[in-house]
Structure formats: structure tokens, C-alpha cells
Image (cartoon, rainbow, N blue to C red):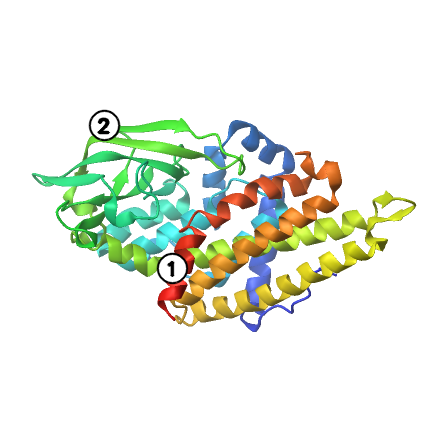
């Protein structure tokens, strides 16, 4: 029996979803066994072949319409992949970034020509996507980015540097946030779609050495007078980039909240199992009242968090998830993730600080969730604006 005993929401009680979940779980067991994932951690990135394997198995582009090579599903199918990935411990595979964050930009904002050109290859795994927003001198403040894409004949010359780019080493399709009109603020931002293979002037920097998320490559990217064809401006019109970004943020932040909830559940289940076996002073750690009180408190908070998260997912499926609610979900659940993992590690004692224990990896991997997708301080600002 799971520690967080919240019944599956009605929107997930579908035979087709159950069949898909079983198939995804079997795929991860067969293609991402522990030994292969450990190799990814050692190398600091997932191997390229796994992406084509995932594409062939139907794990990429679940919500992309069938006419563009996708599977015509909805956010529930994305949730299945993410939950099975978490359950099977498939670290580093950037399914949430590729499927839930980047592909929707092309589906919702791309021209018909752009959809036909890129979506089938993104679904197959031929193209691995990344989005290049953050710069060395501009984090959450997107309006003050310095990367430019200046008109040059029938295209643009892209210049600038980006950092903290997930899938930066593997990606060969990068959506670059750039200013096509540096004189404007938000109105001067466009999303430039760059196929990096053979792109002169494009350069990958070093793979960044992170505190956690060892199997996920995070890199610097450099653009030195890179030519981008004019038809590669997302949506075909300059100046829409900031608004395209803002329109997709609720779903992106909800995905972060989903990941936080998965970690919360795994941390609690791992810790309850541990404290009921580990002995100290002649009895199990579970037998101490402090242990029971702390874990009861965490279970209560986590149960409330999961009920709230399920409501947010239901709202997203109905097209009703607003910026404020998504910000609350991202902020509150990632803060709870930090609290749960920290307290669960404490119950492991010194063993909790040893990397071979799952809780240690969760501890290191969890810290970033309060930073990416907009820091939690930004979330508080957005929430306050609604009051």
C-alpha cells in the first residue's frame, strides 16, 4: 500500500491509459536497466541511441497530432511516461522537456510548414530538442537577454551565449530566445528554431558539473554569427516570442510540480521502509514517537499536495489552468519536496549521506526544482499579483 493513499483521479481511470502505462513500464525495464542508467550517470548524459529507441516505442510526441507523425494523445499520456520514468529510476532522459515543454511550442505556435518539417523528426527521436533561454547575465529576467537575431538577407544572424541548457550536449534542434529588435523589450523577442547539425558558428561549451541530476547533461551554448533561415522564426512572425513563452509556462510549471510530487512519494516510501527495519537502542527507528510524528506530518502535507496537484491536472486537461494556480503548484510542491527529502534523509542517519542510498540522490537532485522553470521567488511575485 502506498504511503500517499490518494485514489487515482477519474481522468486517469481509462483502460487505454492503463494499457499504455504497462507498455511504457516494460519499455523502461527492457531499455533502461539500472546498469545502463548508471553508465549515463557516469558519462553525464543519456546515450543518443536511447532517444531513437524511445521514439520507435512511441514515447515521444504523444500529444502531437497524428497528421504530423504524433500519437494524438493528451497530457495524461505525458503523465504516464513521467510517472513510469520516475518509478523505474530512469534518470537523465529529458522526456518532460522534449514532450511537455518544447513540442507544444511547435504544435501551438508553428506555421503549417514548420509543423510538417520538424514534428515528425521530433517524434521519431531524429531530432532532440532543447530551449535556450537563460544567459550568463540574465536568469529569470527574459526581457533583458542580450542574444540577438538580426535580419540579414533572407535570414538572421544569431549572436550570443546561453547557459544551464538542458540536453545541451545532445540536442540538435534548439529553440533560441533572441531579440530580433533590441530596441524593444518583450515586443522585440522572437523564438528562433535552429537545427544545429552543420550550423556554422554554433558551438557547444562545457558540460556543466552540477550538484545533482548526474545523468542529465546541462551545458553552455554559443552562437557566433550563426545563420538562421527566415522561415525558422517560430510562427513566421517576429516579436511574438515573449508571449509564446508566457503562454506555455503554466504547463511547464505544472510538470515541475508533478516531478516534485513523484520525488515526495518515493522519498516517503523509501524512508518508511527503512525506519521499520533499521534498529537503534533495541528497537526500530519507527518505534520512536518522534519518527511517527514527523512522518505523519509529512504524509498529511503530501496528501493535501497530491489532491491539489490532481485538481491542477484536471484544470489543465479542461484548458482552465491559469498562471497563478500553476505558480502555486510549482512553488508549494517544490518547497514541500525539499522539506520531505531533507527530513527523510535525517532518518537515514549517516547512511543518508552516502550516494549509493536512493535518498541521497533524491536530496541532490531535488535542490534545482526550486530554481528552474522560474525561481520560487518569482512564483511568489506572480502569486502576489493576483491578490
Q: CA distance from mark 1 to mark 2?
A: 38 Å
Asked if residue 7 lies left or right of residue 116, the reply is right
- Residue hosting label 2: 201
Q: Residues within 10 Å of mark 1 (few under 14, many from 20)?
A: few
Q: Quadrant of the C terminus?
A: bottom left
The residue drawn where x is 78% and y is 58% is 292
Q: For mark 1, what is the residue?
A: 381
How many residues crowd around disc 2 within 10 Å: few (fewer than 14), some, or many (20 or more)?
some
Q: Residue at x 82, y 53 (%)?
A: 286
Q: Indicate the position of residue 230 as horizontal and vertical percent values.
A: 15, 44
Task: Check the image and report above or below for 242 versus 155.
Answer: below
Q: Position of residue 115 (x, y in %)?
A: 28, 53
Q: Nearer the viewer, mark 1 or mark 2?
A: 1
Residue with the most extreme left position = 153
Q: Is residue 365 visible?
A: yes
* Number of numbered discs visible in the structure rendering: 2
- Left or right: residue 377 versus residue 189 is right
167 with respect to 364 (left or right): left
Q: Is residue 71 visible?
A: no
| Picture quadrant of residue 89 | top right
**Sequence-wise, which precedes: disc 1 or disc 2?**
2
Q: 142 or 90, which is in the foreground?
A: 142
Nearest to the observer: residue 127 or residue 259? 259
Q: Secondary structure at mark 2?
A: loop
- In this orientation, which residue lies closer to the viewer: 52 or 223? 223
Amino acid at each position: 500500500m502506498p504511503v500517499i493513499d490518494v485514489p487515482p483521479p477519474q481522468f486517469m481511470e481509462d483502460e487505454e491509459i492503463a494499457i499504455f502505462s504497462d507498455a511504457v513500464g516494460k519499455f523502461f525495464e527492457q531499455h533502461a536497466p539500472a546498469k545502463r542508467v548508471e553508465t549515463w550517470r557516469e558519462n553525464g548524459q543519456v546515450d543518443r541511441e536511447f532517444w531513437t529507441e524511445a521514439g520507435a516505442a512511441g514515447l515521444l510526441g504523444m500529444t502531437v497530432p497524428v497528421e504530423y507523425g504524433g500519437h494524438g494523445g493528451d497530457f495524461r499520456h505525458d503523465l504516464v511516461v513521467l510517472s513510469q520514468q520516475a518509478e523505474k529510476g530512469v534518470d537523465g532522459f529529458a522526456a518532460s522537456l522534449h514532450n511537455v515543454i518544447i513540442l507544444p511550442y511547435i504544435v501551438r505556435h508553428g506555421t503549417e510548414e514548420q509543423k510538417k518539417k520538424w514534428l515528425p523528426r521530433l517524434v521519431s527521436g531524429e531530432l532532440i530538442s532543447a530551449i535556450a533561454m537563460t544567459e550568463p547575465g540574465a536568469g529569470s529576467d527574459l526581457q533583458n537577454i542580450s542574444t540577438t537575431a538580426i535580419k540579414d538577407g533572407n535570414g538572421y544572424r544569431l549572436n550570443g551565449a546561453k547557459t544551464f541548457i538542458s540536453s545541451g550536449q545532445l540536442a540538435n534542434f534548439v529553440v533560441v530566445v533572441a531579440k530580433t529588435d533590441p530596441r524593444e523589450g518583450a515586443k522585440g523577442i522572437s523564438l528562433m528554431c535552429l537545427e544545429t547539425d552543420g550550423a556554422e558558428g554554433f558551438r557547444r561549451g562545457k558540460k556543466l558539473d552540477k550538484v545533482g541530476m548526474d545523468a542529465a547533461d546541462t551545458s553552455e551554448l554559443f552562437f557566433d554569427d550563426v545563420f538562421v533561415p527566415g522561415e525558422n522564426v517560430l510562427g513566421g512572425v517576429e516579436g511574438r516570442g515573449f508571449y509564446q513563452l508566457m503562454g506555455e509556462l503554466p504547463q511547464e510549471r505544472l510538470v515541475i510540480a508533478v516531478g516534485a510530487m513523484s520525488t515526495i512519494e518515493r522519498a516517503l516510501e523509501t524512508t518508511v521502509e527503512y525506519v521499520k527495519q533499521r534498529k537503534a537502542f533495541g528497537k526500530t527507528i519507527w518505534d520512536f514517537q518522534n519518527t511517527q510524528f514527523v512522518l505523519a506530518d509529512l504524509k498529511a502535507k503530501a496528501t493535501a499536495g497530491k489532491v491539489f496537484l490532481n485538481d491542477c491536472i484536471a484544470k489543465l486537461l479542461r484548458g482552465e489552468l491559469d498562471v497563478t494556480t500553476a505558480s502555486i503548484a510549482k512553488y508549494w510542491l517544490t518547497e514541500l519536496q525539499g522539506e520531505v527529502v531533507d527530513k527523510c534523509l535525517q532518518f537515514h542517519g549517516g547512511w543518508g549521506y552516502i550516494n549509493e542510498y536512493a535518498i541521497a540522490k533524491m536530496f541532490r537532485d531535488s535542490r534545482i526544482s526550486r530554481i528552474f522553470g522560474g525561481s520560487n521567488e518569482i512564483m511568489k511575485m506572480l502569486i502576489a499579483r493576483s491578490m
